[in-house]
């Protein structure tokens, strides 16, 4: 998922998306434990998406904007 797609979502949508991604990660870990996981790239991609969401949520909570990010 691209950062621009994540930034377009509201805070409530981001919270829901994070929950869905965490659920997906748990299902992937269960599949891995039972040797049914066949695409290991999904683990890191899902973790990265969760990290992107949490980063954007933190930026919003601190009041950072794109203009402020460009200055630093």
Image (cartoon, rainbow, N blue to C red):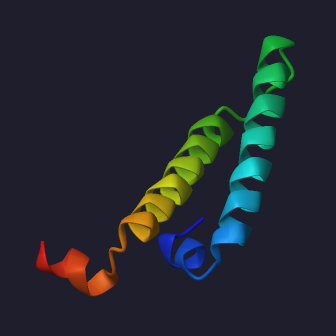
Q: Decide if residue 38 is in sight here.
A: no
Q: In this view, does 59 lie above or below 23?
A: below
Quarter of the figure with the C terminus: bottom left
In which quarter of the view is residue 27 placed? top right
x and y percentages locating residue 35 in the rendered image? 83, 14
Residue 8 screen position, x and y as percent: 59, 82
Residue 29 makes an appearance in the image: yes
Q: Farthest residue in the bottom direction?
A: 67
As drawn, which residue projects farthest toward the top?
34
Name the residue at 71% across, 69% down.
Answer: 12
Question: Left or right: where does residue 26 sit relative to residue 18?
Answer: right
Looking at the image, residue 7 sits to the left or right of residue 35; the answer is: left
Q: Nearer the viewer, residue 7 or 31?
A: 7
Task: Tell me residue 69's x, y (percent).
Answer: 23, 75
Q: Which residue is drawn at 44% across and 65% down?
A: 61
Pick whichever, 46 or 72, lies toward us.
72
């Amino acid at each position: 998922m691209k950062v621009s797609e994540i930034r377009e979502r509201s805070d409530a949508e981001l919270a829901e998306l994070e929950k869905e991604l965490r659920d997906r990660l748990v299902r992937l870990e269960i599949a891995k434990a039972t040797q049914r996981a066949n695409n290991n790239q999904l683990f890191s991609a899902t973790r990265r998406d969760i990290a992107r969401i949490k980063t954007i949520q933190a930026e919003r909570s601190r009041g950072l904007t794109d203009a402020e990010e460009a200055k630093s």
